[in-house]
Image (cartoon, rainbow, N blue to C red):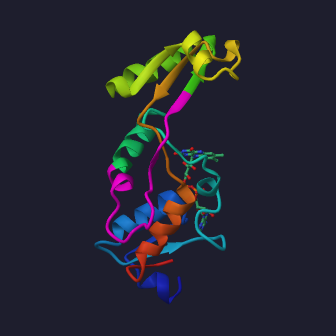
Amino acid sequence: MNETTSQSDVIVLGAGMAGASLAAELAEKRTVTLLEIEDQPGRHATGRSAAMFIESYGNETIRALTRTSRSFLAAPPAGFAEVPLLTPRASLVIANTESLQILDRIHAEARYGASLLRLDSATALAMVPILRAEAAAGALLDHRAAISTLPRCCKLTCESLGTAARV
Ligand SMILES: Cc1cc2nc3c(=O)[nH]c(=O)nc-3n(C[C@H](O)[C@H](O)[C@H](O)COP(=O)(O)OP(=O)(O)OC[C@H]3O[C@@H](n4cnc5c(N)ncnc54)[C@H](O)[C@@H]3O)c2cc1C
């Protein structure tokens, strides 16, 4: 342990979106050192994200994390970002016949009303003609989805740490 880490209350390993977020949260009340093994933050999964913000996507834990992030991304603190972090962009998730049950479960669990529409195959195909009918036995159209680039959010979060934490 060197002088930097021994003087910290908390050491966070990994400056991806998860580590950077945790460090920023803890830095409000603690001295935090955020260590990254690569030459820049967000190089791995964070840097590969397709940038979709979809509250109906993933298991309950992921959906809860995404839901909880919306207020920050929609209205970040003054000075955090010069451009909006969320850009509305509807998403269409398709399922083949074998996966329709999963689609219906996601629809039932999401509980955000008319913003998440369960579409039949004909409607999905009319909306996106390039789809193959056998791949789109049903679909979910999510009007609350958005684009949010994770690498940029990660970089901004690391920058926001300033002197409160060492990166
Ligand atoms: C192809 C792809 C597309 C995706 N698309 C989306 C999407 O559209 N929407 C969405 O919400 N999510 C998407 N995801 C998921 C999302 O990108 C990840 O959930 C998220 O980036 C994970 O962040 P993380 O901080 O946990 O991991 P990472 O970003 O991988 O960060 C971990 C960090 O830890 C560092 N590290 C590892 N070991 C050490 C060590 N010993 N010491 C110091 N540092 C260390 C690594 O170098 C890395 O920087 C996608 C993922 C992939 C791969």
Q: Nearer the viewer, residue 1 or 127?
A: 127
Residue lying at 35% horizontally and 23% vertically, measured from the top left: 114
Quadrant of the image where one finds ligand 1: bottom right
Residue lying at 51% horizontally and 20% vertically, measured from the top left: 103
In the depicted structure, whether residue 117 falls above or below residue 152 = above
Query: In the picture, residue 122 is in which quadrant?
Result: top right
In the depicted structure, whether residue 60 falls above or below residue 53 = above
Residue 1, horizontal then vertical, whole percent: 53, 82
Q: Nearer the viewer, residue 61 or 151?
A: 151
Residue 65, horizontal then vertical, whole percent: 40, 45
Q: Which residues are magenta?
A: 71-92
Q: Nearer the viewer, residue 31 or 83?
A: 83
Residue lying at 50% horizontally and 23% vertically, measured from the top left: 140
In the depicted structure, whether residue 117 falls above or below residue 70 = above
Residue lying at 37% horizontally and 79% vertically, measured from the top left: 164
In the depicted structure, whether residue 6 falls above or below residue 121 = below
Residue 112, horizontal then vertical, whole percent: 33, 28
Q: Main secondary structure of the magenta part?
A: loop
Residue found at the very far left of the displayed protein: 29
Residue 130, horizontal then vertical, whole percent: 70, 23
Residue 94 in the magenta stretch? The answer is no
The number of discs equals: 0
